[in-house]
Structure formats: structure tokens, C-alpha cells
Image: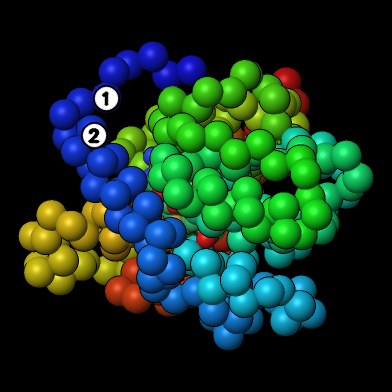
Amino acid sequence: MNASLPSDWERTLKSQIAGRYDRMARDGSFAHGDRDRLLSDGYPEKWARALPRSISDTYSGCGFAFSGSQLGETRVVVDLGCGAGLDCVYLSSHLPPGALIIGVDLAPEMLFLAQRALASMDFGRLNAIAGHMERLPLADSCADLVTANAAFNLAADKGAALSEAFRILRRGGLLCARDLVLDGPLPSEVLSDPMSFNTSLGGAGEESDLHQSLIQAGFQDIKISDHRPFSMVQSVQIRALKPNC
Ligand SMILES: C[S@@+](CC[C@H](N)C(=O)[O-])C[C@H]1O[C@@H](n2cnc3c(N)ncnc32)[C@H](O)[C@@H]1O
């Protein structure tokens, strides 16, 4: 685990993020959660159409992270910044029997919704953990797959979050995520707004920096693909492998 203590800036940022997402979970004010958005973001149509509204409406991600992924051998998945658990629900119906899903989020009310969503789908192997992705309370090499949807962009330290994802993956394990990258400079009113980080846009970085951070964390076979417009930035799919040796 990353042992350094959070700075005052990080504490303030985290309390704003937790406050915002807890509020969203309590009053149901998910910005773009709905079935049409799931479909346009690339989620499989049959699955999305069968999803209860109470779950599809909580979607806060930036795209479908698992296109082209073989999940059949996966025993343990960790979803970083799992929110209300929409991707955990997707995984619950695509993993082999007995597989465990660990959802990590710093907003307790989101974790409550994630647990409720999985319970409503009769899936009892979600371990919902209150934690920070920059300092994961998880053992080394415990996961076959790490995912994160629109979450790394909110990390106070993206390098630390990616290093933690690498640490908890077993050798040969896969990082399969969606995140935001810049599509040109952001307007000055966004850059000067202290809240823009906590609403995701301000946390989007250059794609080349993301690629470099993945290399620095130790990943190989890195692919950043499927660029899609997302507000003023772009959503991308990230796939990266923890090498076998
Ligand atoms: C944009 S939402 C995405 C939620 C979910 N992945 C989805 O696709 O619906 C980002 C989530 O990440 C969580 N989060 C933000 N920063 C975090 C951090 N440093 N550690 C853990 N969770 C974090 C927020 O509380 C929020 O639930």
C-alpha cells in the first residue's frame, strides 16, 4: 500500500468529491444515468434493456470498459470508484460462478447503492469497501482484473492510483478501464473553477501523460483506444497488462 499521508489539498478535494457523490446517491441526481446513455456508450443492448431503471439510472461512467474482454477466467475483479455499482452488476452476470467482485469507493452512500443493486440481482459476492484508490486496502496480487470507469480522472494522484492498480493485480492480470483525456485546451472558465476537478473535467489529462503513467506503474501492452466525445473532453478505453514475469 502507498504509505504517504494525504496532503491538505488532497483531503479537501476528497471531502468535496465524497460530499458530491454521497449527495448524488442520496437524492438520485445522477447527471446522465439512463438506458439510452448506456446504449450510446456501447453497453450491450440486450443487457442494458433488461436492466431495471433503478440501476441503469445510476450510471455515472464514461463508456463501456469491457468491449473485447474475455471474462471467463476471471475469479477476482476490483472496480475502483465503483459508484452505485453499474459495472459490478454487468460483471456479476458475465463472470464464472463463484467469482468475487470488490467495489472500492470513497463515498459510502454510493457503496450502499452498489450493495443494494447487486443484492437485487441475487449476487451475493460483492465486497464493497470504503477506500481511496491511491491507497488501496487490498493485498498485493489479489486481483485478476482491475477496472475503473470515469474514476482515475478524479484521483488526487493518478500515478499513485495506477501504481496501486498494478500492485493488486496478479502477474498476467489485466487493467481494463475507461477514463477521460483532454481533447485540446479546456476553456479558462473551467480551468479557473475550483469545482471543475471534482466534476471530472478538470481531472482529465493529456493522453500522452496517461500512457506514460501506465508505463511508470509497470504496465505493458498498453492500448488507449475507442476515443469518444465526452462533454469538452474525450472518453477512452484503457487496456494494459501486468507482465507475467
Ligand atoms: C464518475 S463516478 C463513476 C462511478 C461508476 N464507476 C460508474 O461508472 O457509474 C466516480 C466515482 O469514483 C469515486 N471516487 C472518486 N475519487 C475516488 C478515490 N480517490 N478513491 C475511490 N473512489 C473515488 C466517486 O465517489 C464516484 O463514485
Q: Are marks 2 and 1 in contact (CB under 8 Å)?
A: yes
Q: Quick one: label 2, few (<14), some, or many (20+) residues within 10 Å?
A: some
The answer to which of 166 and 147 lies nearer the viewer is 147
Disc 2: which residue: 10
Residue situated in front as seen by the camera: 222 or 21: 21
Q: Is mark 2 within 8 Å of ligand 1?
A: no
* Residue drawn at x 71%, y 74% as measured from the top left: 51
Q: Position of residue 36 (x, y in %)?
A: 58, 85
Tell me which amino acid carries mark 2: Glu
Residue extending farthest to the top is 3
Q: Is residue 208 visible?
A: no
Mark 1 lies on residue: 6
Residue 182 location (% of width, % of height): 33, 63
Above or below residue 88? Residue 128 is: above
Q: In the image shown, does 32 or 207 lie closer to the viewer?
A: 32
Instruction: Give the residue at x 68% y 74%.
Output: 52
Can I make out residue 22 in this image?
Answer: yes
Give the crowd class for mark 1: few <14, some 14-19, many >=20 residues within 10 Å: some
